[in-house]
Amino acid sequence: MTTQQQKPPVLWLNVAVFSVTLLVAIIGVPLYAYQYGFDWAQILMLVVAFSFCGMSITAGYHRLWSHKTFQANALLRFIFAIGGAFALQNSILHWSSDHRIHHRHVDNNDKDPYSAKKGFFYSHIGWMLRDYQASRYHDYDNCRDLQKDKIVMWQHKYYLLLAIGTNFGIPFAFGLIHGDIWGALLLVGFLRLVLSHHTTFFINSLAHIWGSQPYTDRNTARDNGFLAFLTFGEGYHNYHHIFENDYRNGICWWQFDPTKWLIKVCSWIGWTRNLKVTPADRIEKTKAKMQFKRIQQQLSKMPNNVARLTQLQQEYEALIAKISDYYQAKKRLLDMEKQKIADSYDNFEFIQQYKSMQARLEQQRRAWKGLMQQYTT
Ligand SMILES: [Zn+2]
Ligand SMILES: [Zn+2]
């Protein structure tokens, strides 16, 4: 039996959808633009529709349903369910089931549905072009919680109808109002879908190939600011794979994570609640551990390294201890503030201790940074 014969059968419908939409987007759209042009209203609608699809996947399918990093009201879940069908990425139930397997068995070529170890093409789109998952296609056992969500089950039942309805209906309705049905179908229908597909697919392919690994090197996931820009914040994938229960992917204020901003803003109006975050000390310790591991590996290859390895070990242990001390004190202070006793005279001494712990941690962070620079430059 040859390798070719061993491969599962080609899913011609998927091949047709991906190739026809791609061809129309790269040939039809420029030709139409050359012949008739597109105006700003059409470009704006493209951006709005692209964002609607993208965020329904990132905030809805991914951070809400697959990982349960927050809760959302029925209206927002309904909006995400419609946007997800418009994004044409299968039902919430199916997508989440695949994604939970991806996290559980990341990089395992036999189990991870889009294992990055099988290469760029496979993890990007190849995994959907053949019937690789025939044996477990309708097995949603890992999503029993989602089966209790009426909106998830409604979308799953009527997925095909919703997908066709939104993908033709929304561009058609806009074209009708705006006065250029063909232009709308090309731009908001085809180009939007192709952009939405491939940018999302980058999270399975490029975000497991290209970028840095500040938190863990135990899987292929990478942090990549450029990909975050294309994927509504999902490019911080190294962070995401280690702290998958966090509603954020980009944790710093300057990191581009509009999905996080959307979830946060929705919490202000009561549409989302119970937003989960990883404690800051755990994040900092995980990052320090990874840095420690890297420098240790680097040093162990060098001659006469005993003194340096000892110094590295000592600085690392001091950093971890000071992080623990400071965050424990911070937690106590917050509890005291809640009970409104922080200002009382009895706690004055504790607040002084807290401030000195903070200063000692800052000093240790600087020492650690200096040590890192010594070995990375
Ligand atoms: Zn995930
Ligand atoms: Zn991943």
Image: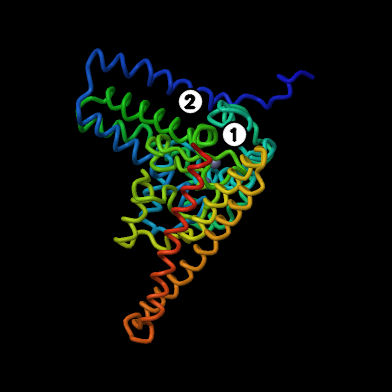
Q: Amino acid at mark 2?
A: Val
Say which element carries label 1: helix
Q: Is residue 115 left or right of residue 253?
A: right
User: Is residue 254 placed above or below 131 in the rendered structure?
Assistant: below
Q: Which mark is residue 116?
A: 1
User: Is residue 313 placed above or below 166 in the rendered structure?
Assistant: below
How far apart marks 1 and 2 lie (CA) works out to 23 Å
Question: x, y (%) of residue 234?
Answer: 44, 42
Residue in the foreground of this view, choosing between 156 and 97: 97
Residue in the foreground of this view, choosing between 46 and 242: 242
The answer to whether any part of residue 138 appears in the image is no
Q: Is residue 189 left or right of residue 321?
A: left
Q: Amino acid at mark 1?
A: Ala
Q: Residue at x 40, y 58 (%)?
A: 72
User: Is residue 325 placed above or below 203 in the rendered structure?
Assistant: below
The reply to whether the residue tagged 1 has its Cβ within 8 angstroms of ligand 2 is: yes
Residue in the foreground of this view, choosing between 334 and 160: 334
Q: If the image is split into quadrants, where does the N terminus sit?
A: top right
Quarter of the render that holds ligand 2: top right
Question: x, y (%) of residue 47?
Answer: 29, 34
What colour scheme has been applied to the protein in the rendered image? rainbow
User: Is residue 63 placed above or below 124 in the rendered structure?
Assistant: below
Residue in the foreground of this view, choosing between 369 and 217: 369
Q: Residue at x 34, y 86 (%)?
A: 345
Q: How many marks?
A: 2
Query: Label 2: how many residues lie within 10 Å, few (<14), some (14-19) or many (20+)?
Result: few
Contact between labelled residues 2 and 1, with CB atoms less than 8 Å apart: no
Question: x, y (%) of residue 264?
Answer: 35, 56
Say which element carries label 2: helix
Q: Mark 1 or mark 2: name the one nearer the start of the chain.
A: 2
According to the picture, the residue beneath numbered tag 2 turns out to be: 17
